[in-house]
Image (cartoon, grey):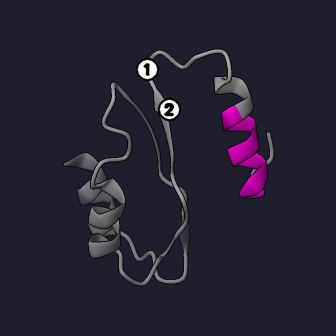
Amino acid sequence: MPIASFLEEYDFTSKTILPFCSHGGGGLGQSQTAITKLVPDANLEEGLAINYSGGSGMPDDVAAWLDANGIER
């Protein structure tokens, strides 16, 4: 629950949240729904879920997600 505690403690009104995770097959699961409930006044963008195995396309997937969200690398 550390992420939930963090989200509850700070004011995310009009802030943009870009969730990301690594997983073994469950993807983001219910994370985006839970974040929306915790910080309904934030702007929740599409998250990035990377499988533990990564695959050869992982670096390109991460780079494309960062670029699409205007994040400098």
Residue closer to the observer: 26 or 8: 26
Q: Position of residue 49 (x, y in %)?
A: 48, 40
Check whether the beta carbons of the residues at disc 1 and disc 2 lie within 8 A of each other.
yes
Amino acid, disc 2: Ile
Magenta-drawn stretch contains 63: yes
Magenta-drawn stretch contains 57: no
Secondary element type, mark 1: loop
Secondary element type, mark 2: strand
Residue closer to the observer: 9 or 68: 68
Please identify the quadrant where the C terminus is shown. Answer: top right
* Label 1: few (<14), some (14–19) or many (≥20) C-alpha neighbours in 10 Å: few
Q: Work out which residue is located at the far left of the displayed protein and give it.
A: 1
The secondary structure that most of the magenta stretch takes on is helix
Q: Is residue 21 left or right of residue 59?
A: left
Residue 39: give its label: none
Give the magenta range.
61-70
- Give the vertical position of 5 relative to 40 (above or below): above
Q: Quadrant of residue 4?
A: bottom left
Q: Is residue 71 left or right of residue 53?
A: right
Q: Which residue is mark 1?
A: 52
Q: Position of residue 34 (x, y in %)?
A: 27, 63
Amino acid, disc 1: Tyr
- Give the vertical position of 1 relative to 24 (above or below): below
